[in-house]
Image (cartoon, helix red, strand yellow):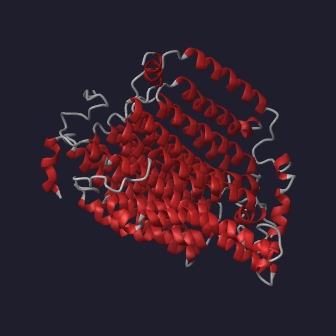
Amino acid sequence: MIVLFAIFLLTLLVISAIAIVRVKNLFVAVMLMGIFSLLMASTFFILDAADVALTEAAIGAGVSTIILLSALALTGEHERFATANRWLPLLVVTITTTTIIYATFDKPRLGDPEAPVHQHVAPWYLQNTPELIDIPNVVTAVLASFRGYDTLGEVFVVLTACIGVLFVLGARPEDAPKPAKQQGLRHHLIPKVVGRLLVPFIVLFGLYVQFHGDFGPGGGFQAGAIIATGIMLYAVLEGETAALKAVPSSLLMAMVAGGAILYGGVGVAAILLGGNFLDYSVLSSNPVDGQHLGILLVELGVGITVCGALLSIFHAFAAREHK
Amino acid sequence: MSMMIDIVSWILLLSGGAFVFIGGIGALRMPNFYTRVHAASLTDSMGTILILAGIMLQAGWSLALIKLLAILVFLLLTCPTASYALANAALLSGLKPDAKTLSPDDKGRPTP
Amino acid sequence: MELLGLYNYWVFAILLMVGFYAVIAKSNLIKKLLGLSIFQSAVFLLYITMDKVEGGTAPIIQKGATDQIFSNPLPQVLILTAIVVGISTTALGMAIIVRINEAYGTIEEKELQDQNRDP
Amino acid sequence: MFFATSIAILVTMALALARAVMGPSVYDRVLAVNMFGTKTALLLSVVAYLYGRPDFLDLALTYALINFVGVLAVLEFFQNRTVSPDLNKNDDVR
């Protein structure tokens, strides 16, 4: 029954993907990307991946639309050339699709409990999380504790991408002429009022997701994205300068680096206390309490870095716009 | 008693679904932009209220009830605002709400 | 019904190749990047498809409930981080496109190649 | 009954997608995206109950809070793009 939902949503997903590729106006493509992300989040939720769906929701609903639109504002929104030679790519794509579909006939069916994926390490995680870590959300336990190295790596990738954007687009020059026009939404009083009302609630909800991540869907990645969305909403309403006044760029830099350092620092602290790198059990006299403390700090580091990185990227694009 | 609550919540859920569906048809079939906004936004609010009320009756007194209330309040704040802002932006950009001038397509031609 | 269990994988294949088509056939750089992001989403879908267990529920252990079947948490962890990394890398690509536009005045691959041929 | 409601929502999502693909004006597409966001929030809350896991309402709450941000970003995009003088005379609207 639920499988039928998934099939319906996946069909819509294919339609929207083809529409994204075919449509001429890039602004429309970005709008359809928004729908694509909404469909993706629903599909993830129906396939039992609540944490992933929350991440896709936090990223796809606000951040990615805003970043794509601010890039479009700088480059222009019309695709000028039709595809010149479409037959060769189409041929390649058709052959590859057919090959992949042929290959899937050997895959285990959806939901097969005997599939090789479910035999290896996953049952161990599910069995031992209550005893070793004692938090209900197994995804958070695996993310922050069992596979802490992976997550540390991902945090550094986000940090590197942020540094890359700042290098490529350049920081805002100090003596840049102040934009003469009034920033923010000018003609829209009602959205401004309602939006201003929502900003604190979005940030509050972000904090809830951050600290409730051990018990329900949530964690640092989602919380960072949600809080960044809240501050981006403020920037959209009041103008980018006002948002920079509220969260100055020096603070953003400190957040981006500080979160990553916090994550690494917890690992180093574990070494100094006599354990392995990122082995939180030694952080407290009781190993389970140590795990709780370690996961809390690590998720906090992730949240701070993601929030700072997304906001820095947003400001880097927005600063270009006013030059 | 619980039977009554179930029946009421089923009626609410079904009528909410019907409202949502009618709104979808309206957004697809109406002739120009402003009528589509009208069809989509009103039924959106009504469908949201009915469906969430139906779920609330099923939830009973729990944390979920508070979350559902929060969802309802925020959806009721944001949806009409978004529709208003959209219609306002379209009006400011020069899309005339005249029944004779149907909404132009991307290249500015009137559509039949 | 047996074959419907493979539908997710077919959608994965189609989405992958729709994204790939945009990357190789389209001339506009932003369109290529959007294609890349569809490609990426297809991979996410593959992983999440593999995590589902029949009759299972999301791997968040509920107090009091016993003998629940849980879906596989591992693919979820991998994809959760990959989504955030994905948007950061897309933003980096966008930044490079913005700079290309400033330097050459166009983001169409064809015009960029023409400019390189006869400066 | 959750099942019937979610089917109605799914069909509406398909209709909204059709509107988004057909256009014709860009505002129609934004309208479709906004509709789609509301429908997703409703679908997620209904499916959470269909699964019997009410603690997943957080997802619907996320959409209820931040789906609006995308629409406002679009409005700001339009506002900065269309700076023709005859549009600015409408400043007294606010």
Figure quadrant of residue A10: top right
- Residue B107: x and y, percent? 29, 28
- Whether residue A109 is visible to the viewer of this picture, yes or no, is yes
In this view, A153 is above or below A21: below
In this view, C21 is above or below C2: above
- Residue D39: x and y, percent? 47, 52
> Which residue lies at the image location 20% right of the left edge and 46% below the top edge?
B92
In the rendered structure, the answer to whether residue C28 lies left or right of residue A301 reads left
Q: How many marks?
A: 0
Of D28 and A237, nearer the camera is A237
- Residue B30: x and y, percent? 31, 39
> Which residue lies at the image location 47% right of the left edge and 56% below the top edge?
A312
In this view, A44 is above or below B77: above
In the rendered structure, the answer to whether residue D29 lies left or right of residue C56 reads left
Of A19 and A58, nearer the camera is A58
- Residue A93: x and y, percent? 63, 23
Figure quadrant of residue C104: top left
> Which residue lies at the image location 61% right of the left edge and 37% below the top edge?
C39
Q: Residue lying farthest front?
A: A175
In this view, B59 is above or below A252: below
> Which residue lies at the image location 56% right of the left edge and 66% below the top edge?
A304
In the rendered structure, the answer to whether residue A3 lies left or right of residue A61 reads right
- Whether residue D11 is visible to the viewer of this picture, yes or no, is no
Figure quadrant of residue A263: bottom right
In the rendered structure, the answer to whether residue A9 lies left or right of residue A100 reads left
